[in-house]
Image (spheres, grey):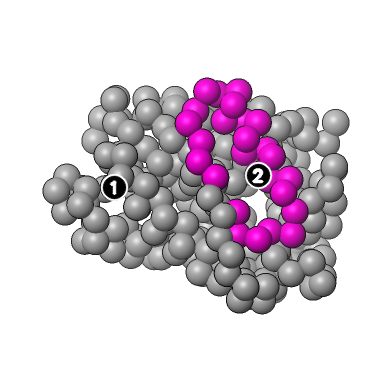
Amino acid sequence: MNPTNKKAIVLFSGGLDSTTCLYWALDQGYICEALTVGYGQRHERELQAAREITQRLGVKHSIIRLDLPWLKTSSLVDPDQPIPDVPVEQIPDEGIPSTYVPGRNLMFLSIAGSLLDAVGAQAIIAGPNAIDFSGYPDCTPAFFSAAAEALNLGTKQGVCGGIQVLAPLMDLSKAEIVKLGAKLKVPFELTWSCYAGGTKPCGHCDSCKLRAKGFEQAGVHDTALD
């Protein structure tokens, strides 16, 4: 599909990966609408990042909030749970960590599909990565392929014209994502990846460690640390 004049819903957290996806989509010629979902995260810092980045780009941005009390099984939602702190080389071996949010990407893609159907878009773009990640089952190629099939069967746009569910970072290492972001002139200093919130990244959570590894391997300075 030639993306020129095609509209896309970009699932957008304000983090490194989703921001790189948004810049990639714009570079590809998509007319983008960003969708951010608040699901009770233990901090608002990533939502602030999402607002700042979309405002800079002049991209339409919707923030919706979910109030699902059972999501507190995740340490990303329950502030009383500790966030895992393991060596970066052990992250692939820790199994599904406590930061896993039950059904998060399943919910996000369903909501994005509803918005897509309502506004007449043709694609959903998301930033999962199955190389340097924490082992979440909803960040895999198999899951996204199945979700795309369901969206094409269960929406008006899917049945009448087809929906693409694009995950351009799925098979990239974190270093490759950083290099792509640098090429696209992503404002790294505006992005937020840390699970803990605060004014500066904690440096201890999986997300901080994987991000640091990516910037180091890419030979790029992370301006979010300035």
* Residue plotted at (84% across, 48% down): 198
Task: Determine whether 164 is above or below 40 in the image.
Answer: above
Q: Badge 2: how crowded within 10 Å, few (<14), some, or many (20+)? A: some
SS state under label 2: helix
Q: How many numbered marks appear?
A: 2
Q: Earlier in the sequence, mark 2 or mark 1?
A: 2
From the top left corner, tell me how far across and down residue 2 is, in percent: 25, 30
Residue type marked 1:
Asp
* Residue plotted at (59% across, 65% down): 67
Residue type marked 2:
Leu
Q: Find the magenta span and give its range.
A: 38-63
* Left or right for 127, reference 89: left
Outermost residue to the left: 160
For disc 1, the marked residue is 117
For disc 2, the marked residue is 47
Q: Quadrant of the C terminus?
A: top right
* Residue plotted at (35% across, 62% down): 147
Q: Indicate yes or no whether the magenta region holds residue 58.
A: yes
Q: Nearer the viewer, residue 217 or 110?
A: 110
Task: Determine whether 41 is above or below 165 in the image.
Answer: below
* Quarter of the figure with residue 50: top right
Q: Is residue 50 visible?
A: yes
* Residue plotted at (29% across, 31% down): 6
Q: Nearer the viewer, residue 50 or 147?
A: 50
* Left or right for 223, reference 113: right
* Left or right for 223, reference 68: right
Q: Indicate yes or no whether the magenta region holds residue 59.
A: yes
Q: Is residue 171 visible?
A: no
